Structure formats: C-alpha cells, structure tokens
Image (cartoon, rainbow, N blue to C red):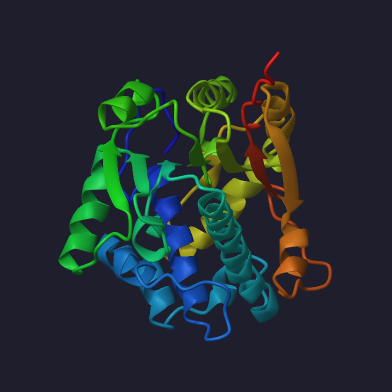
C-alpha cells in the first residue's frame, strides 16, 4: 500500500510490519548462545502481533533461504546485520548513561524493548513515541507478560507528523536537560523535508551534552523501486505481503551526517561492514549490500556548554 500524508498503521500493517520484521530478526539473533544481543521480549512480542510468516520463522518452520537470493550463509548474515544494528544502539545508550545522561527519547519506538531490558541507572526516564495503536499494543502485551521497565517509562502515542514536541513536554520532558535520542530505522520512512524537520526539532530540544543515534541510508537516493517490487512479489509467494517500494520515500534528500554537522553536532559514522568487524561477525564474500546500500550507523553529540572564565 502506497504511503499517504495521513496514513496510520499497527504492527501488522504498512510501516508497522517492518518493525515486526526487525523484532523477529532480533529474536532469532537472541537465540544464538554466542550472539551479540539478548532481547527476551522480541519473540513474545512478535508472536503477539500474529503475522504467520514471522511466527514460522521463530518456530524454525521457515527456511530462511526463502528470502530472495539468500543462501544459508547470507541468511545468517541478514540476522547478524540486525544483531549488529541492535548492539550499536545498545552500546550508544550505555555510553550515554555512563556520561551521566538520564533523559532518553526513542522516536518511532515500534517493538523496541530497551526500556525493559537495558541496565539503566537510577532516575533514568525513557520516553517512547509511536503511533497510538503501536504504543498501546506493546504496553499491553508487555504488561500481560509481567514485564517491568528498568527505567521510568513514559509512552506517548502520537504520529510524528503531529506536534510531538508539545506532547513530549507535556509528558515531563525537560529540554534544558541533556538527552539521549534514538531514531532507529526511521528516516527512510519520512519524506525528505520531514527528515530535515525532524532533525531540526531534535536539535531545538537538545541541551548541550545531548546525543543522537540514527542511520544514514545512501541507497535511498537511487532506490530501485521496480527491483524492490520484484523481490516483494517473490516474498509474497512465500507468505509475506510486505512491499518496501511503497513504504519508503526514495530520491534526493539531505545527507544525515552533513546535515547534523551543519546544525552544530559532532558526528561520527560506522558502516555496517565496520560493525561486523567490530563485533566479530562474518560477512560472506561478495555479499551485496542490498537495495538500500551500505547503511551507515550514526552517532552525534552536542558539545557541552563552555564554562565562562572569570574576568
């Protein structure tokens, strides 16, 4: 289904189903005893969503080579890619916490369970923003599982096209306090001008000492929609009706890292290949980066305010 300016979704449809896909990969990565990550909530959340394709993945009833062009080695690399991505953002939050940041905002939080599974310092407040149906589903499902957040969790059901900064402030957010922001797997689902607007809003709400982690996806510039539709058609034959070509906004847009640098952030980027090396993961020879190109994982910081020397 093609995106519109006022579309909405739950975790079984449209953009929401991509969050369920990522959570399914996190669940499989968490099942590896030597794996990078441990997300005990990913599998029960995916099962609660109820998309049969992903449930069969978790039950081992679906051969991962069903994905287009996937050999067993490449199928494992796809799971490892999500593990590396998850580890990158987990490590980012650990570093922010170690630096004393106690205010966290997760934009488009989907099935992210970090408020529950990470080791947060005392007095940390985690704000989660997403579509109202997404927030309600996750909150209800985790409560039914008996899960308790490890930080003060403040979920906010709101579309990011609405006045989410006002909703954030109303929930207790303090723009004068350093904040650790995450926009994971979000920006390609925003029109170019909305991407810039979101980053501008984050900058305006970020006190000195704040941090931000997100991705730069160069392949979105020349995204091959026809090839993506062909891949989606092959996946539909195998039971997954998820057409990425209708969900992302392709074409020219701001370079995320440059845009943040010009807005006063100190920015670093780590390509996926670098994360594989960092975390000791194997990248198959001649493995193509995929339709979105070589994703770069971005971390940024607003320099602390300088103390004024007495005259």
Quadrant holding the C terminus: top right
Front-lying residue, 84 or 205: 205
Q: Extreme top residue here?
A: 311
Percent from the top left, x then y, of residue 216? Answer: 67, 41
Mark yes or no: residue 3 visible.
yes
In the image: residue 144, left or right of residue 215 = left
Q: Does 68 appear above or below 64?
A: above
Q: Extreme right residue here?
A: 286
**The image quarter in which residue 209 lies:** top right
Front-lying residue, 30 or 64: 30
In the image: residue 35, left or right of residue 224 = left
Percent from the top left, x then y, of residue 55? Answer: 35, 72
In the image: residue 105, left or right of residue 193 = left
Residue pictured at 61% horizontal, 48% vertical:
228
Quadrant holding the N terminus: top left
Percent from the top left, x then y, of residue 110? Answer: 38, 49
**The image quarter in which residue 80 lies:** bottom right
Residue pictured at 18% horizontal, 56% vertical:
140
Q: Extreme front residue here?
A: 311
Percent from the top left, x then y, of residue 151? Answer: 33, 55
In the image: residue 151, left or right of residue 187 = left
Residue pictured at 58% horizontal, 54% vertical:
95
Mark yes or no: residue 238 visible.
no
**The image quarter in which residue 42 lies:** bottom left
Q: Does 244 appear above or below 305?
A: below
Residue pictured at 55% horizontal, 25% vertical:
203
């Amino acid at each position: 289904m093609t995106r519109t300016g006022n579309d909405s979704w739950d975790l079984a449809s449209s953009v929401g189903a991509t969050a369920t896909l990522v959570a399914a990969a996190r669940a499989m990565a968490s099942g590896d005893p030597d794996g990078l990550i441990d997300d005990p909530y990913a599998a029960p959340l995916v099962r609660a969503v109820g998309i049969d394709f992903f449930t069969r993945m978790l039950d081992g009833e679906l051969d991962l080579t069903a994905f287009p062009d996937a050999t067993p080695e490449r199928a494992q690399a796809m799971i490892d890619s999500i593990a590396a991505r998850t580890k990158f953002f987990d490590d980012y939050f650990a570093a922010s916490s170690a630096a004393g940041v106690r205010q966290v905002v997760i934009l488009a939080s989907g099935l992210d369970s970090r408020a529950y599974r990470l080791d947060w310092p005392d007095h940390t407040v985690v704000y989660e923003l997403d579509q109202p149906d997404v927030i309600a589903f996750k909150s209800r499902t985790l409560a039914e599982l008996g899960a308790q957040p490890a930080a003060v969790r403040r979920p906010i059901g709101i579309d990011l096209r609405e006045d989410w900064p006002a909703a954030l402030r109303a929930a207790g957010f303090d723009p004068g306090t350093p904040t650790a922001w995450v926009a994971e797997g979000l920006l390609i689902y925003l029109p170019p001008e909305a991407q810039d607007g979101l980053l501008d809003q984050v900058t305006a709400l970020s006190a000195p000492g704040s941090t931000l982690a997100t991705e730069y996806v160069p392949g979105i510039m020349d995204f091959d929609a026809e090839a993506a539709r062909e891949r989606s058609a092959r996946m539909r034959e195998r039971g997954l009706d998820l057409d990425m070509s209708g969900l992302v906004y392709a074409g020219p847009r701001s370079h995320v890292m440059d845009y943040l640098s010009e807005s006063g952030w100190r920015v670093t980027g780590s390509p996926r290949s670098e994360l594989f090396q960092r975390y000791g993961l194997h990248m198959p020879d001649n493995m193509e980066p995929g339709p979105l190109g070589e994703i770069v994982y971005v971390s940024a910081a607003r320099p602390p305010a300088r103390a004024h020397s007495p005259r």
